Image: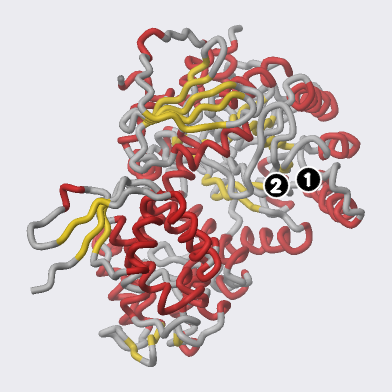
Amino acid sequence: MDTIDKLSILADAAKYDVSCASSGVTKKNNSGIGNSISSGICHTWTSDGRCVSLLKVLLTNNCIYDCKYCLNRKANDIPRASFSPEEIASLTFQFYKRNYIEGLFLSSAVERNPNYTMEKIYQTIFLLRNKYQFNGYVHVKAIPGADLEYISKLGYIVDRMSINLELPSEQSLQTLAPDKNMNSLLNPINYIANNRQLVSNKRLITNKFIPAGQSTQFIVGASNDSDYALLEASEQLYNSYNLKRVYYSAYIPINEDGALPMLTTTPPLKRENRLYQADWLLRFYHFKSHELLNKKNPFFDEDLDPKMCWALRNLDFFPVEVNTASLKTLLRVPGIGPKNAQRIVRERKAYKLSYENLKKMRVALNRAKYFITCHGKYNSEISLNAEKIKFALLNNTNKGQMTIWNRK
Amino acid sequence: MEQKIRLIYDDSFEGILTCLYYHAKKNVAGITHDSTQKNLFDNYFFIKTNIDKAQKMYSFLNKHYGKEFLRDIYYCQLSNDTYKGLAILKYFELAKILGKSVVNAFSHPLANPLKALVHKVSMEKHRFHGLIRFSNYASFLLAKYEPDHNITELIMPHFSDRLKEEHFVIYDISRDLAGVYNTKNWHIKNETNINFNVLSNNDDFEILWREYFQSASINDRHNKKVQKQYMPRRYWKHLTEFEHLK
């Protein structure tokens, strides 16, 4: 089989992994080829609007497992292919040299057994780092069930590692991924977290262990788990294992199974988006999951974003005076993000900020205006009333208006 | 009526600093690099770039307003905006009032025109760290592109670190300007008159890249609008993955 056919099969099979980040680590190039900058770099955008930063491929799609949600489950009759370590290393190097990519995201189906697969992944990265002198970004997906020794070996030559939990509860794992269990997934996550802590305590500068940290992914909408269950699980991962990022992937029905949504179900993109927004609120806005959802209200609102919903439920927190409010308080205002909150704090030292200033800073005033005062002045025609604000928001945006009329 | 004095400079960083030097001596009403902006009622002076005066101004600005202020002026000067000279002049005026904290004045009417241009230039710089595409020739790599702003000298450091051991050229077609790296250091070459037609390359990796680009897209999530939002159509011309559009 030609490289081009393998690439077609194994890129297609890898694309449902959401992660493509090349961020989290700054490296200068000492010799050979490649460096990385902590903000990450996007190289292109595919026709689904997703950014391409890394060459995202599977080593093989030959799988011994039979996870029901997965395209590569062994029961499926699909074309199968495997790359050799040399093929992937060469492809990565050549793409990188032409500036198509920031590096490699290597993942794999479980071929023969977890250890065999991890060994091949290790060989690939070893070749890339040594024969090709490649210093660009490498993200590897660890194979659950493999000996921790492999994670330990790989940890010193990759930038990021991830283990995809896919589902937030033991129960849904049992139903949809009978070959996996929560422990086999959490073990390596725990191991990575401990090892990173250990290595950073020793202040080893030359040998960093997974310097860009670990991430994971949940599938949204394949099981019955609520948004609250997913968000709480993410919060725990951030707190207990110091994860850099949790990704959410709207389930795209590819397999027919009684335990899964029907093939005609459209992917829950809106839900995925709300979880994505809420996840940012956890990481950069100091929100806690229980502030956004609870057992009684375990799902996000489709019409309004999670931060706006929180604000409308907590009107006594507002209005906030932009010239005196703390950074943390500003971050709670809908329409003000971390960048603008910081700008406000910096700029107001020089002079008092007016409504015009915020406009120039491109604060999203259509949302923020209900919740702030500038210099004591409240600049919205509507008073602080949840119903009225909600009505105004949904009628001001064409999108909002359309959803309302379509439903009724 | 007293005529206002306006300065015309050669569109260089040293040029704009020379103008600010004259402005500090005698108030001027405007600075422009574009002589078509002249109008009948004002007095125009062509300012010859003076390295010595520029250096004096540089040290003065660095001492009083800091590195970030100089960086703002440098980035703004690289933008393609007709009124960038005036934006820089206003920013300098505000610096006299606010001192070092001028760099935080994002939304002040005297600073905002400049800050907006600096933002555009920085954005495009970051974008092209990703969107530059090299073609592979026997002894070197060549990237052709048409950025809105004059960002070649801003992106050269990134690529000379990354591709330390490669010879490469990044060529700005519309400005006829090339960034050249020879595995040791880089420089900018103006008026290159490079004839690209003599070069031909037959590169399997370009075909593989196009195949990858197609395969990585999820059809159920088709969203051309977002694709164009992040990667405007005007950039597609020189991207290997859209070769079929040529």
Q: Quadrant of residue A377?
A: bottom left
Image x and y of residue A17, in percent? 59, 38
Residue A276 position (above or below residue A315): above
Q: Quadrant of residue A397?
A: bottom left
Is residue A41 visible in the rendered image? The answer is: yes
Three-letter residue code for mark 1: Leu
Residue at position x 35%, y 26% in the image? B191
Query: Left of B239 or right of it: where is A94?
Result: right
User: Which residue is identified by label 1?
Assistant: A185
As drawn, the label of residue A211 is: none
- Crowd tier of the residue under label 2, counting other residues whose Cα lies within 10 Å: few below 14, some 14–19, many 20 or above: many
User: Which residue is identified by label 2?
Assistant: A165
Name the element at disc 2.
Answer: loop
Badge 2 vs badge 1, beta-carbon distance below 8 Å = yes
- Crowd tier of the residue under label 1, counting other residues whose Cα lies within 10 Å: few below 14, some 14–19, many 20 or above: some
Q: Relative to the observer, which residue lies in front, A107 or A321?
A: A321
Q: Relative to the observer, which residue lies in front, B188 or B204?
A: B188
